Structure formats: C-alpha cells, structure tokens
Image (spheres, rainbow, N blue to C red):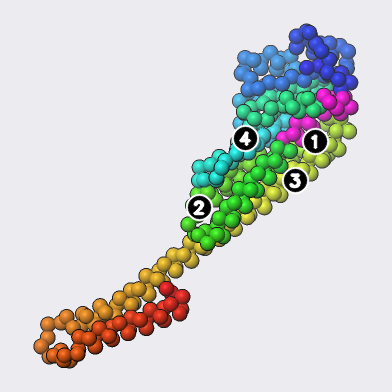
Amino acid sequence: MTYRDGVRIPESVGLVDAVERVRSRRDGFVWLGLHEPTDEEFAGIAELFDLHPLAVEDAVEAHQRPKLERYGETLFAVFKTICYVEHEELTATSEVVTTGEIMVFTGRDFVVTVRHGRHGSLGPLREELESDPRQLAKGPSAVLHAVADHVVDDFLTAIDAVQADVDSVETAVFAEDGARLDPGRIYQLKRELLELKRAVVPLGRPLEELATRPIRVVDPEIQAYFRDVSDHLARATEQIAAFDELLNSILQAHLAQVTVAQNEDMRKITAWAAIVAVPTMVCGVYGMNFDHMPELGWRYGYGLVLGVIAAACVTLYRGFRRNGWL
C-alpha cells in the first residue's frame, strides 16, 4: 500500500513501480505486510528495500526475542505477540497463552511488516491508522509506533485474563479442601507466566531506546508516543512480577496445607493406635499360658477386664478428642 500525506493512494502498479514513484517524488511511503514468508518470497523484497541479510534471516526464521537493531538507514524491530487461550477450567496441561512474532523493517520511505503465528493480524490496525491521516502523515515511524502500541495493548489484555486464572487458583488453595488441589495447576500457570514474561520484559530496552534516543527514521514527534507505550509496558512488567510472586506464595501455602493435612492424619493414626494398644495389651497378658494368673478363676473376672478395657479406651478417646487429635 502507498500512503501520501497520511492518505492511502490507490495504485494499479506493482510493488517495484510503487516504490520507484515514492522515491522519485520523495513523498509518502510504502507499507508492505507479509505473513510467514519463505526465503524465496522474501528474497526479492530484501533486494528491493536493501535489507540486511542478518535481519532478513531473523524475519524468515522467526523465534527471536524482542529487540531493536539498526542497519544503516533501516531500523529492524522484533515484537513478541501474546494471545490468551480461552479455557473452561485451568488444568495441569492447559494452554493459557500462545505467542507469535511481528518483525518491522522501517526505512525513510517504506515499512515492511512480517507476521508469524495464528494471531496478531494487522488488518484492523491498518484500518485504524488510515482513519487518522494526521498521525499516519508522520511517516513509517507512525506505523512502527502503532505496531508497538498494538502489541503492548494485547499484553495488557492477556494479563487481565491471566489475573482471573491466578484468582481462581488462589481461591481453590484457600478453600476447605485446598490441600487436595492438584499442584500441577499452579506449576502450569507459572510456566505459562514465564512464556508471557519472555515476551514482555525484553521489550523494555528497545522501547526505551525508541522513546529517548534520536533515530533518523523516527519522527521526533513520534518519540513522545513511544514514551506512552513504554509506560504501558512498565505496567505490564510490574503485573507479571506481582503474579509471579503471588504464585510463589500460593504454592508455598499449598505445600504448607499439605504438610498440615499429613500431620493431622498422622495424629489420628497415632491416637487410634494408642486406643487399640490398651485391649491388645490386656488381652495379650491374659492370653499367656500360665496356671497361676491373677483372678483367673474368678467368676466376674471376664466382665471386669472388659469393663476396664472399655473405660480405658473411652478415657483415651475423650482425651484425644479434647486435644484435637481426633
């Protein structure tokens, strides 16, 4: 797409002719969007815009961490995209977030965006920018800012959704049967949070550079907008750190509950063993094969022994109940 003074110019010519017209007039810029291009598909574009081979390799292969690099007159930015995965209930195998990537080549008169992943479409973003010609008239750096702002807004949306999962796990842990909670749910949420952290935290330095350092292809007026995006990213980073700390506390609380539950079970087992020990001892004594046992021939001896056993067991039971062991 060709843009001049913030307005999209209908072009019936090919990409090469459109670029030549923009460069000959020294006015406007070309915005080209690609989705998971191959080496062969990207080769001609790299030659047309004189893109650095290292940046081209990163754009095609993907799986890069967020970064900002300068190659001559071209700026190469990598953004990780995040999408929250809806699920009815968090389990030990639930996918909470899925990631993708957006690479942006920004030059004096062109923008090339390369998207990887099933989400993060830039179609709505393009329409939104086209509805604001004044902002789009600032050139390719306006597109770069819009992409960065779009990515960070998606971070905040995903983080708000993850908040519900964290609250759900916290509520389950402190419920009456919290000790029975599958700890795999907590570990899975921590793993997914780590994936979110890998996308958000490394973006801080590139945004700071875009917001504070003079860059030739970035309009000075746009830098103020990058500072706003950087503030939003700082908020996202703080929330992720808070989630991580909270999940650590939740995990420790769950482990403490399991330990307490195990101790209660051991106390119950010990108490019943003590109660059973009384009749076992008495019956064991009278089961010895001796002729001269005390009160062995007494008519009421059997009933008395049963009464003593019952009284001892009841006394022990009431004592253990009073102390909370049973």
Between the C-alphas of marks 4 and 1, the distance is 23 Å
Residue under pointer 4:
99
Q: Is residue 39 above or below residue 288?
A: above
Pair 2/4: label in front? 2
Q: Residue at x 86, y 11 (%)?
A: 24
The image quarter in which residue 208 lies: top right
- Residue 291, percent from left and from top: 10, 88
Give the residue type that dot 1 points to: Leu
Badge 4 local density, few (<14 within 10 Å), some, or many (20+)?
A: some
Tag shown at residue 183: 2
The image quarter in which residue 2 lies: top right
Instruction: Tell me which segment is drawn in magenta.
Output: 130-151
Provide the secondary structure element on which disc 1 rests: helix
Q: Which residue is drawn at 79% across and 32% down?
A: 145
Give the residue type that dot 3 points to: Ala
Give the residue type that dot 2 points to: Pro
Badge 2 local density, few (<14 within 10 Å), some, or many (20+)?
A: some
Residue 134 falls within the magenta-colored stretch = yes
Between the C-alphas of marks 1 and 2, the distance is 42 Å
Pair 1/2: label in front? 2
Residue under pointer 3:
234
